Image (cartoon, rainbow, N blue to C red):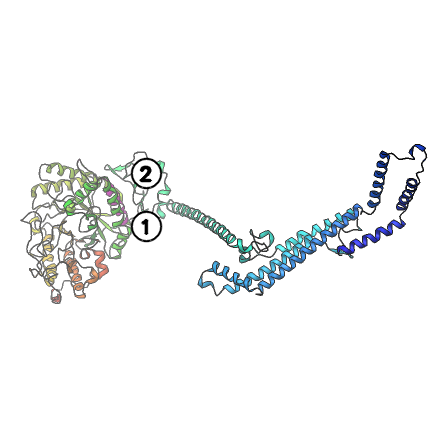
Amino acid sequence: MPADDRDRDRERRRRRDSSTNPHHQTHRKKRSASSRDHHTGTNSTSTDRELSAAALAQLNTQNARRRHSISAQDQPSPRQDRERARERARERELERDREWEREVERERARVRGESSGGRERERERRRERDGDEGRREARPRRESGARRERVLASEDEYEYRRATSKPKREKGKYLGVAGNDDDEDDERRRRRSEKVPEMRRRSGARVVSGAVLEEGRGKRERRLRGGWGSNSYDESLDKEKEEYNEEAVKKRKKKLWIMIGIGVILAIILIICVAVVVSKKNSGDDEESEGGNEMESGGLGSIDPTSIPNGAPTWLNPFKWADTKGFNLTYTEQAVGNLPIMGLFSKWDDSKAANEHTPPLDKPWGDYAKRPARGVNVGGWLSLEPFITPSLFEYDRRMGIVDEYTLCAYLGARCEGVLEKHYATFVTEDTFKEIAAAGLDHVRIPFSYWAVQTYDGDPYVFRTSWRYLLRSIEWCRKYGLRVNLDLHGLPGSQNGWNHSGRLGAIGWLNGADGDTNAQRSLDVHDRLSKFFAQPRYKNIISHYGLANEPKMTELSVPAVLSWTENAHKIVRANGVKDAIVVFGDGFRGLTKWQGQLQSLDNAALDVHQYVIFNTNQIVFNHSEKVRYACAGWTEQTVDSMNRGTGFGPTLVAEWSQADTDCARHLTNVGYGNRWTGTLSTGNASNDVTTPRCPLMDNRCDCGPANADAGQWTGEYKRFLKMFAEAQMVSFEKGWGWFYWVWDTESAPQWSYKKGLAAGVLPAKAYDRDFNCDLGNIPSFSELSEAF
């Protein structure tokens, strides 16, 4: 009630009580008696009749006390004080509730758009936060949702305050008001406090929207500093948004790093699991591996690094190898013929056949005169040749890097890494799989003496190529391919050409170290033949080559013949019984071999046929090249196969369908070519300075000749295929053939693989279209003879 009404009511009660209260009547009697005594001057003793100043002061003090006592009767009791305090508290709470209600109404009005200034600020804040043009269409829905959240949050807050602050009415009374004792007040306050958590939970069940939370308008316990309802709302909004956004970014970053960490851990676990599975799969019974020849390895994870002795050489330490696929990685120092057997499994399977036209490895091949070999060389791999892999020789010409010797001399210790990368990538398991798929059945694998041994002054990489040679044999086994071992480079160089290892002088059987290098070569064969005499190689090693292309035009013929006899004797004595021992014709001419070395058992003469390296044959036009392959080479092969006119068993271990010598680095790095008359060897007797294309003039051009296979015309492709098939027919008059080479980096006329892709070789080597019918050789008049 109003304060004036309360004062008047209090005065009426005081007057009423004073007229009826005995206590007040007693005080009035005492005051009357005292008053009479004071005014009449009567007292019980005569000495007190006349008051001294001290007595008067004392009397005044007593009268003042009586007045104070009388006025004290009008003061309320302690209980009334508590009642009035509670009344004032209720009034303050009511006023706060009314203010809160007004605040909620203002917010509702702002949400409904009654406050135009508020709407404008809201739009501005939304534009700053959203920014993205593409999200504006969805903004009205988000804003309306935010407004609903603000209203709901305000109502929840209002209900919560009412539950926690405003007393409930009970039978017309407030809890804890006058008329109830303190115990009742405490009990009611306790009951009220028990209801507050439930209302708090009920008010806190609503999820505040992102917009409400960002602007500080959520429930009280969730609001940011300076949130909704604060006088500093407008001033602190930007700061709050910035702090909130920074905190959100931190949380997102933290979540991202957690996710990345989890991803890395899962990836590691997955890798470990895969490694364990693969290891278990490959560490099972040897006979469970594909083909039974145990060509699958558990990888480095399947072996203990401590099992490798300290100081183990790189060729025995699998942790130093660039590629471990297909190897048994168990460390061993075991050797045969003083050559390590590293990487070999204990079992093998020779039951595979290259195709339906050939017997499996564990069955005899039969007579090569009736079933000739159809094979290919994996040249330029374990013995480098610049025209096959020119990328390894991309140096300034003035540096003189022209062969494997000068390359390794320049690279030094780095040469091992460079060459092993080449070994691991240029020829792979897929190579042999593709060879078998092409209808081929033999593979000639050129390698050099440094796979076995190096000598003082040699810059070559020792022994690394040996591991790849052994692995390639096992891959041949897997696909039923028989192997022709070809010692391509001998100590001192047997021909002075780059593919022997060192371009220049011939130091094998020649010069000051000729005899030494001859003996070193025999020592190499002694070790090789002991190793390959093992039972695991009996069926797969079909040909054993002694020396690739010894240049007998510059060597002592008797010395070469003697050395060949000695090498053959060593190979047979060491246990290589069944393989055909192959020796080169030395460019003497096939007829000159009649009557020579014919006492050698199971031996064959190896001849390499190319028209482009012959100054008088390179000038043949397209039609003449095909005719020469069919007639000329067939005749030579037949004569060589006849012991009355030649050596006897003859095979062609190198040939190609290239009709020019234009391929880059083919004649050596920087030498030029015969086709355009630019061949410069440093030896005038070997130089060709006039064009030798069929036109024999300045129209001779190597540009189109070196073009990519995709630029070849249909007529040129027709010629290339016919030229290849003519040679196949001719060489099969002997003991078969081996194409040079399987693949090149950039010389498609020399690549069997690229020829297959271009359609200039038969899809299957044993299924051909042209059978050397001389009457069906076209003129190829549409082709230019300049390239």
Look at the image and give the residue range highlighted in magenta.
456-475
Question: Quadrant where the N terminus lies?
Answer: bottom right
Given contact means CB atoms under 8 Å apart, are the residues at marks 2 and 1 in contact?
Answer: no
Q: Return the mark for residue 291.
A: 1
- Whether residue 537 can be seen here: no
Q: Where is residue 444 in the image (x, y as percent from the top left)?
A: 20, 49
Question: Dot 1, crowdedness within 10 Å: few (<14), some or many (≥20)?
Answer: some
Type of amino acid under label 1: Gly
At mark 1, the secondary structure is helix
Q: Main secondary structure of the magenta part?
A: helix
The local crowd at label 2, few if under 14, some if 14 to 19, many if 20 or more residues have their Cα within 10 Å, is some
Residue 773 location (% of width, % of height) = 13, 64
Quickly name the residue at label 2: 331
At a point 61% along the width and 54% down the height, the residue shown is: 204
C-alpha separation, residue under disc 2 versus residue under disc 1: 24 Å
Most extreme residue toward the top, as rendered?
Answer: 47
